[in-house]
Image: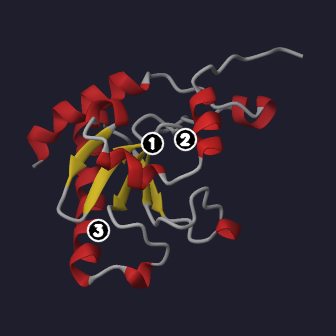
Amino acid sequence: MEQIWAPWRIEYILQAEQGGCFLCQKPKENNDESNLILYRGESTFIILNSFPYNPGHLMVAPYRHIGHLDELTDAESKEHFDMVKLSIKLLTETMKPAGFNTGMNLGRIAGAGLDDHIHTHIVPRWQGDTNFMPVVANTKVLPEALAATYKKLKGGLHGVL
């Protein structure tokens, strides 16, 4: 059997063991670059997914720890969707994807890894961005480091705001 090393995954494993909600904790730390927070609104923020499906995989989340959509206020709902639109515009301008997968996994049975703090995933897609690796080796190859993606997107914010 061939081994493929993914040493960055240990952070995810250890984080999961620590418990707590990373979507609550990271905005409180006032260290946006290392926490991959791209943009802050009044009630929601945009964060780069640390364990992405594709380069540029973003998440939009409210600051409040809520697990159901009906718990959002009207203002939070509007800002949340505006942040999803901003994320798509930012990714379109900076990374030129051919399309997007956007959505929420509501509840553990629906695939939510974090089911008590709602968030929306925005995953940029390109022609040919899947290959034999996920099917045969259960491995996803990401062609760009998170820090490089963060800098590219953070720099692109000025052009889309």
Task: Estimate how packed mark 3 is, as few (under 14), some (14 to 19) or many (20 or more) residues with alpha carbons within 10 Å.
Answer: some
Marks 2 & 3, CB-CB < 8 Å contact: no
Could you tell me which quadrant the N terminus lies in?
Answer: top right
Amino acid under disc 2 = Tyr
Taking the image as shown, residue 64 lies to the left or right of residue 14, namely: left
Q: Residue at x 53, y 37 (%)?
A: 51
Taking the image as shown, residue 132 lies to the left or right of residue 22, namely: right
Q: Position of residue 120 (x, y in %)?
A: 43, 61
- Cα–Cα gap, marks 2 and 3: 21 Å
Q: Position of residue 125 (x, y in %)?
A: 46, 43
The kind of secondary structure element at disc 2 is loop
Height in image: 64 above or below 149?
Answer: below
Residue underneath mark 2: 53
Taking the image as shown, residue 51 lies to the left or right of residue 78, namely: right
Say the numbered circle drawn on residue 37: none
- Cα–Cα gap, marks 1 and 2: 9 Å
Marks 1 & 2, CB-CB < 8 Å contact: yes
